[in-house]
Amino acid sequence: MFPVIKSIQPGSSKQILAAGHLLALLLIALKKEIGVKGRGIITHLLLLLLLLPEATPEMLNSKCPLTLIRDPNQPLNWFRPGDYHISGVISATPVGFNPSVFNEPPFTRVSGMGFLPPWYTLSFLFAVREVNRNHRLFPNLTLGYDIYDNFYDARMTCGAMVDLLCPGQPNIPNYYCGPWNKALAVIEGADSDKSKDISIMSSIYKTPQLHPFLGSSQFYNTSMEGVYLDEKGQLTVESDVVNWVPFPNKSFGAVKFGSISRQGSSGPKFTIDEEALVWSRLFNQTLPQSRCTKSCRPGYAKKVQEGEPICCHACAPCAEGMISTQEDADHCTKCPEDQYSNKDRDQCIPKIITFLSYDEYLGTLLASTALFLALITGLVLGIFIKYLDTPIVKANNRDLSYILLVSLLLSFLSSFLFIGRPRKVTCLLRQTAFGIIFSVAVSSLLAKTITVVLAFLATKPGNRVRRWLGKSLANSIVISCSSIQILICVIWLGTSPPFSDSDMRSQAGEIILQCNEGSVPMFYTVLGYMGFLAAICFTVAFLARKLPGAFNEAKLITFSMLVFCSVWVSFVPTYLSTKGKYMVAVQIFSMLASSAGLLGCIFLPKCYIIVLRPSLNTKEHLTTKA
């Protein structure tokens, strides 16, 4: 378009109008056939055509018919003539526009417009004046400016760019007669949308931006001190950060509240004096947040990184049992003891109450097993009572067999004290009953073993051990050994008895209802004494296993005590490695397994003979076997 207009001779205004109308029609016809980028170029060309001045017959008598006189009071433009110009378009004043018409310039249709240039424009105008006064910078030359305010409007931006890029007079691209006002650079201070329009139009004439033009220059401030820019066009000296504060007389003043230092440092350092910062009442008086990282989501907390500024923090997830409910939390908050954190660590939810109950599979299985073994023990006890006068029942002290069977029955039934919701009574009875019942059972086995040994020694001539044989010795062994365990339990209950308690820390998300043993050393004392009796019983039975005698029980006792000791030796590490209701399950299992071992190894062979092989349950058979 521009070479066509430049080739038109002066005075042919009708040809200009005809060419303009023809080109407009051509562009409108082609607009449907081209893409989005082409449409943008067409839009700018149409705007250029609309800005062509109205041609009148009087212009034919002029020597330079397209010369227009600039209005010095034009509110859109700050203009100063010079040998070289710095042009610019800024977005400074928001205004409202009346409906567009085509018989008068656009700026006359603006309402609510202010005429005072913004402070940064005034600084530029004063700087140009100082440059022109300093003959060391531009000897014999003057610097002018041509600054437009586009009022945040695309039409005003295009109109200003047409005027700025015309080398001669306003609004006629590629046409000039007389001086050529060459623009050195274009200052661009508009918003992002208008910057695209400025870039497209300025690139046609290869007009540079001001920033690279001044990239390696030296300037002088009002005190004639040198101010340098680095290779990136940034100031190398310290800059003050000021706040414009209104005063009661409606004037404004700059108050320093910070600085930016670059000289002698690897990077810019920004400093703010919060006490010197004065906020206007029109603004929210909260300090802005400085950051160089993304915000920490709920469930995370800020973590200061060593060697980095405070604003350059990392985001660390909250630990288990802790939460954060806000963004950029300084620290995580611990949940109450009866609650725990969810998976996202941004909410506390109630913990689940748990204990070994009859409703769950494990509790039902253990209870059923204990009940079944108790019934078996009761059946064996009934068989021994029914056949109490038979030789096999009388052998090795019938009363001790009854004591052992009753203690085994009670040991199976005591398992029910460990199942269910822990209460005050059950917590007091469960461990003491366990210790006393098992001590009675092991004591009766020890008495049986000692009876076998004494009976063998009594068969030797001249041995005085015969007088020790009888029920009195066996009963005294059971009573004395059991009494020691009873004394230990009484001391335990008197000093620090067990009580019902809740454990909120062992398992995440659970409140474990359990019996607190009160004194852990006392619990292991009870367990240790029971193990001591079992060890003595096993040793004596092992030594007496080959002694002759009528139905010698030493072999059966040896094997039963081997099972008993194996169960309780493995109980200790297993018990210590589990938590919560599974500790209770381990103890119940050990009680059932050890008692079942004693029942099966000692009494099942006898019941087999009594019920299924009655012919062997005779004194002659036992004597012959011996």
Image (tube, grey):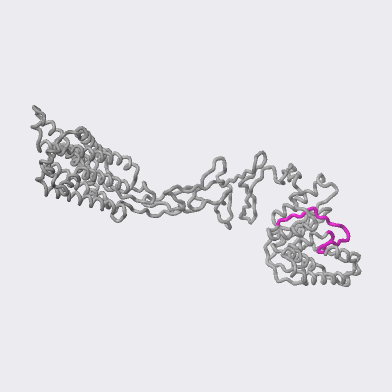
Q: Measured from the top left, where is residue 369 in percent x and y?
A: 26, 51
Q: Quick check: 139 above or below 534?
A: below
Instruction: Kindly give the residue lying farthest to the top in the view shown.
Output: 462
- Residue 409 in sight here: yes
Q: Measured from the top left, where is residue 414 in percent x and y?
A: 22, 48
Foreground residue among 506 and 16: 506
Q: Quick check: 526 above or below 380?
A: above
Q: Residue at x 55, y 44 (%)?
A: 310
Q: Residue at x 35, y 42 (%)?
A: 577
Q: How many marks?
A: 0
Q: Residue at x 56, y 56 (%)?
A: 284
Lateral position of residue 531 relative to residue 197, left or right: left
Q: Residue at x 81, y 67 (%)?
A: 52
- Magenta span: chief secondary structure: loop
Q: Is residue 179 magenta?
A: yes
Q: Quadrant of the C terminus?
A: top left
Q: Measured from the top left, where is residue 126 in percent x and y?
A: 75, 51
Foreground residue among 368 and 135: 368
Q: Is residue 251 magenta?
A: no
Lateral position of residue 608 relative to residue 127, left or right: left
Range drawn in magenta:
167-189
Foreground residue among 164 and 414: 414
Lateral position of residue 148 relative to residue 421, left or right: right
- Residue 144 in sight here: no
Q: Measured from the top left, where is residue 461 in percent x and y?
A: 9, 28
Q: Quadrant of the N terminus?
A: bottom right
